[in-house]
Amino acid sequence: MSTPGQMAQSEVDSIHKLKTAFDNIKKQLTRVIVGQDQVIEELLIALFSKGHCMLEGVPGLAKTLMISTLSRCLSLEFSRIQFTPDLMPADITGTDFIEKNPATGSFELLFRPGPLFSNMVLADEINRTPPRTQAALLEAMQERQVSVGRVRHKLANPFFVLATQNPIEQEGTYPLPEAQQDRFMFKVYVHYPSFNEEFEIARRTTGVVSDEITPVLSGEQIQEIQTLVRKVPVTDHVIHYCLALVRQTRIGEPGTPKFIKDWLSWGAGPRAVQNLILGGKARALLYGRAHVTTEDIKALALPILRHRILTNFTAASEGVTTDVVIKKLVEETPEKEGALLGDPRFQKMFAS
């Protein structure tokens, strides 16, 4: 993609179509879902960036309904996997079986695909299944394929995993290690609705309502958008800003703020920088722009960094969460290029 002033007409048209599609998707979802605009936006950004999402929220916040409705808006095949302690990898990836061919009388080894062979997969309560099954899901997310025996089977394209976690009940669960959470582009918090939103929810769900959804985008169009996202230009200044945010979370880095050393025991890795840039590109397109700004990065700092940094005992004793750390980090990081590169603290950091 060329610069904003020199863009090809086809690229300009594609951006306008995407902005219109984004508005239409939100309009369609409001027929079923009340509120949660920020969550929906983050889900779409992850999808268009070829990322995956982890959603965390208490039961009853319509997480499953939101995801299934979104799949209908996008004409994507949807499957839900309810993770349980006895779930095995073959239950989600699929398995080989032997069947007799009636024509020849010989026996053939065939593959029966599991629920992972869908465009949009809801991994419900992923922390309730053992690590072996979690690893099978994470392999599919990373490689976009599953291995059964010695045969590798390609997954559908586009392929989008949304895993949910219940933050209330921890007994009998298998929390994902931080290294595995890093595979998810976003960790999205689903909060309680406001008073007016809950009033509307109560009115709608206790009466007769229509939930007809008109598909807005096809799988092929989504793949085109994913390709377009990669073409969005990003300036060196925005990359420097992403690096400043991420590298400040690492305790051993020169120029790391004191509050980071006091509250964190582990910082974010390079994948955080990559996801900030990709997410910024996708967000820029959704808002009808062909360039990334620091505002795009700031808007995505929380969902991208909150599961990639680890607070220590001091932070826990003071009631400091990862979100508090990230917000303070964003507030204290200068956005302007001159202020960022002219700060001795960041000069040391970038030189290391």
Image: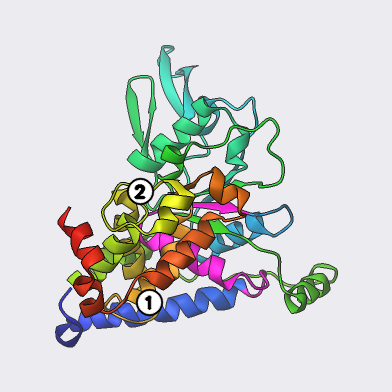
Instruction: Sort mark 2 into few (<14), some (14-19) or many (20+) by Cα contacts within 10 Å.
Output: many
Question: In the rendered image, which quarter contains the N terminus?
Answer: bottom left
Q: Give the SS element for disc 2.
A: loop
Asked if residue 52 shows in the view, the reply is no
Taking the magenta stretch, the answer to whether it contains residue 49 is yes
Asked if residue 153 shows in the view, the reply is yes
Q: State the residue position of label 1.
A: 295
Position of residue 335 in the picture relative to residue 298 (left or right): left
**Which residue in the rendered view is the most extreme toward the bottom?**
5
Instruction: Sort mark 1 into few (<14), some (14-19) or many (20+) by Cα contacts within 10 Å.
Output: some
Q: Is residue 199 above or below residue 97?
A: below
Please provide percent x and percent y for residue 54.
52, 50
Three-letter code, disc 1: Glu
Q: Decide: marks 2, 1 in contact (CB < 8 A)?
A: no
Please provide percent x and percent y for residue 229.
29, 66
Please provide percent x and percent y for residue 111.
44, 26
Q: CA distance from mark 2 to mark 1?
A: 26 Å
**Magenta segment:** 30-56
The residue under the point 42% across, 60% down is 46
| Viewer-nearest residue: 331 or 134 | 331
Q: Which mark is residue 251?
A: 2
Q: Give the SS element for disc 1.
A: helix
Three-letter code, disc 2: Ile
Q: Is residue 313 above or below residue 227?
A: above
**Which residue in the rendered view is the most extreme toward the top?**
106
